[in-house]
Amino acid sequence: MGFADPAHPLVALRRGDGIVGIGEVWRGEFRGASRFADAARTWRTLADAAEVADPVHRAGSGLVAFGSFAFADDSGAASVLVVPETIVGRRDGVAWVTRISVTGTGEQSADAEPVPGAGRLPAETPIGERPRATLTAATLSRDDFVATVGRAVERIRAGDVEKVVIARDATASIPADADRRAIVTELAEAYPDTLAFAVDGLIGASPETLVSVHAREASARVLAGSTARGADAAEDAAAATQLATSQKDLDEHEFAVQSVLKTVRPHVTAVTASEAPFTLKLPNLWHLATDVELELAEDSSGLDLVAALHPTAAVAGSPTDAALALIAELEPFDRGRYAGPVGWIDQDGDGEWVIALRCAHIDDDGMLVAHAGAGIVIDSDPVAELAETRMKFRPIADALR
Ligand SMILES: C=C(O[C@@H]1C=C(C(=O)O)C=C[C@H]1O)C(=O)O
């Protein structure tokens, strides 16, 4: 982490393994409904023309772009791919440095070298103090959120949608020169089973893998259905059992799994999902989870799967188009890149993409905006959903305490 830029860190870390990017040799910005297709096409052209020397052969050791995409087609937020100048990585006990340069004609070349060995590490700077701030409800007050969820339930009863995810926003302000790496470090340590990420100002720790691709094999983890952790061991076990047997949560989960299975089919040659959901334990919540394994079709990349999968029922609802329309109608803010895909892709289309949850966007002035949402179904209790969003703000709120 000490290698990253304190003001603009590029990070994708899980359990201490992963990549940190320094500097920037190329940036692509994409907007609108074609943002994924445009990014996938642009990246394929760039990657095909690149010269990559990668004796390290680890996930993320070659030519890599970090990426973060807006949730909505009409978002004001740009979706970005960023290629750093230098990548420092560590995976399975192997460390490396990759240096990337761009020739006069625009072609990129990437040279990965192991450390210790030929690779020379860039300079590290000590990580500054963690900025302290309090998150406060922004556009939607807590009462407004409860009322909005009530309206969503009415619309579900009226048959407009089966499920819709309603989010609320919260803001805080940190000093403009605060070391953003301190926040990522705190998130990575507190939530080791997540992907801790920092891409173009969006910083978080997501438990939900949209898709991870390695050597044409892909896997996804679907989360939907949540409950708070219990106060003691007995209460905690009861909470997990209650979640695993709650028909409301199982239904909500099934929507999410079906939406994933349906959308990936054109891009894969095989797909298998675990038979029944399992309960995933996070420090703040229990989630219902299903793992899906896929084999990527010949001409598909990680970004094609991202394009097909986004937005899942876990962050939009079901059916997708009606849920998106209802979100646009009921949520009085632009989600920006919250609940959009965030991650990285390499020259072969391999990479790791999570859904940008438990995150905040921090601009250069230190203005921080976080979002948290909850899946609403026909028998959702608005006050319980408010409590759920409070739990989902905790990673960011605690990282700023
Ligand atoms: C929408 C969020 O989380 C999603 C919604 C969940 C739910 O409704 O149970 C669970 C995990 C995520 O898929 C969020 O964290 O903001």
Image: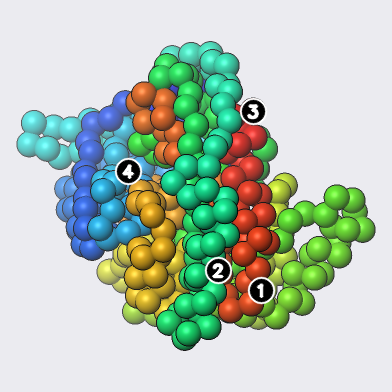
SS for callout 2 = helix
Label ID, residue 150: 2
CB under 8 Å between discs 2 and 4: no
Alpha carbon distance from label 1 to label 4? 36 Å
Q: Which of marks 4 and 3 is nearer the N terminus?
A: 4
Given the image, on which type of amino acid does mark 1 rest?
Answer: Asp
Given the image, on which type of amino acid does mark 2 rest?
Answer: Gly
Label ID, residue 401: 3
Q: Relative to 331, is 258 above or below?
A: below
Q: Earlier in the sequence, mark 3 or mark 2?
A: 2
For disc 3, the neighbor class at 10 Å (few under 14, some 14 to 19, many from 20) is: few
Residue named by callout 1: 249
Residue named by callout 4: 65
SS for callout 1 = helix
Q: Label 1 CB, ligand 1: below 8 Å?
A: yes
The quadrant holding residue 223 is bottom right
CB under 8 Å between discs 1 and 2: no
Residue 60 showing in the rendered view:
yes
